[in-house]
Image (cartoon, grey):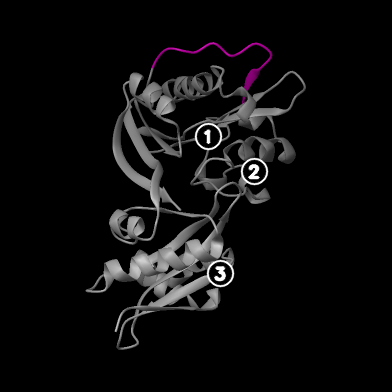
Amino acid sequence: MPVTVSPTPPAGLPPVFAALYGAPEEAVAWMTEVLTGAWVARNAAGEVVGAVGLRPSPAHGAELVGGALPGPEHGEAATALALISRQEAGRAYAFADGALFPAGALEAAGYREVAAYRLLAGPTPEGQAEVPEGLRLLPLADVPDPATRLDALATYEDRIGHHAVTPEAAADGAGGFDPQLSLIALDAEGRAAGLCRASPEEGYARIDAPGVRPDLRPTGLRAALLLGVCALARARGLGHVSVESWGDTPEELAADLRLGLGVEIENPILAG
């Protein structure tokens, strides 16, 4: 008898997610609170062999949260969960990390590679890029207005791998980011044009790849934000950086590689 999949209330998923992610239930409980649908997979003996939930994405349907547990039914369970998710959501994507949702299992469910999560690292890049005319860069700490900060965070929302921003994300210290080490770009009308957040870690700066308003992506704003944050990092004596990105374009990846950064982690994102 093959693996079977059935709907389940999201509130019942923390024990399964804890097993999937190797974390305490309280650490994964937040995931279930944002799900719009959830399913569990069982083997012929009725044992749970995986679970998935749909986390809404502003421009890409939903992200698959969860996956298949290790075991003989791993691939079959992952494919079955990915298939029901795509059928119910209409559009869905998943990170092919090789454990929860292997790429082969996603492909068997009709998903295809469209982007990637990447962690790049290396010596803190030097140099600077010209800020496009009509724009200015300021430390995030100098722009405390929550609405402006949320607009800046929203520049990521159309990128696969990102989700709708919440007011909590605009607060100082959210995500561990330092508002003095982060830069926000404003246009001539004072509207948010882009954002690059960073956090000082032990010996290096952790940076989120810049978010840029879609109408300004053809400009040099992304490079100006990233190199501007790198300059702030160097001023703090941080000689290395790590840069995380979700759904960056091949051109953006090439630009980061030209700065001397190298890919340390890459997880494909498949969508269907």
Q: Is residue 21 above or below residue 268?
A: below
Q: Is residue 239 left or right of residue 140?
A: left
Q: Which residues are magenta?
A: 126-139
What is the three-letter code of the residue carrying label 2?
Ala
What percent of the width, then of the height, locates residue 14?
46, 73
What percent of the width, then of the height, locates residue 15?
42, 76
| Among the 4 quarters of the image, the one containing residue 139 | top right
| Among the 4 quarters of the image, the one containing residue 200 | top left
Q: Which residue is mark 1?
A: 197
Q: Which residue is mark 3?
A: 37
Furthest-left residue in view?
72
Q: Which residue is mark 2?
A: 170
Write the residue at 57% across / 44% down: 173
Q: Is residue 112 left or right of residue 219?
A: left
Q: Is residue 201 above or below residue 260?
A: below
Q: Is residue 226 above or below residue 157?
A: above
The answer to whether any part of residue 213 appears in the image is: no
Front residue of this view, candidates 63 and 192: 63
What element does badge 3 sit on? loop
